[in-house]
Amino acid sequence: MSKGFGDMMRQAKILQEKIARMQEELGEKVVESSVGGGMVVARANGRQELLSITLEREVVNPDDIEMLQDLVVAAVNDVLKKSQEMAAQEMGKITGGIKIPGLKIPGLF
């Protein structure tokens, strides 16, 4: 095995270890989205896992369920987008901002 190939394999292993650590850390980082003037709040971690949805009592109107559904969807979509952006930013720190073709990170992308 050539020295160059061995170095490349060591670098790949180091990158893999950094990514595994980043995934663990992202599971502990939380982002939040608030819609409807704070009536609906969604929280997710950096792994795009929805952690909670908080509804203010005033937004729960049995005569207007569609508005509540729309607010929940908007909050969830926004918080997941924020989570993805945070994960991409953290990944950029590891890769130096270089997009690596075919790099898929379980639980992230």
Image (tube, helix red, strand yellow):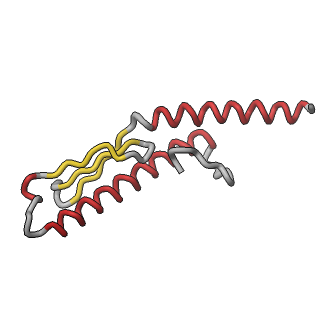
Residue 14: quarter of image: top right
Q: Which residue is rendered at x = 11% and y = 59% of the image?
A: 59
* Residue 48 against residue 5 in the figure, above or below: below
Quarter location, residue 35 = bottom left
Which quadrant: the N terminus? top right
Q: Is residue 26 left or right of residue 78?
A: right
Looking at the picture, tell me which residue is in the foreground, 64 or 29: 64
Give the answer, above or below, for where 93 lies relative to 66: above
For this view, does 77 lie left or right of residue 94?
A: left
Residue 84 appears at what percent x and percent y? 45, 51
Residue 82: x and y in percent read 39, 52
Residue at position x 76%, y 30% in the image? 10
Residue that lies at the very extreme toward the right in this rendered image: 2
Image position, residue 87 (x, y; %): 48, 45
Location of residue 91 with respect to 65 vertically, above or below: above
Q: Nearer the viewer, residue 69 or 75?
A: 69
In this rendering, position of residue 50 left or right of residue 64: right
Q: Residue 38: x, y in percent?
A: 17, 54
Residue shown at the point (84%, 31%) measured from the top left: 6
Q: How many marks overall? A: 0
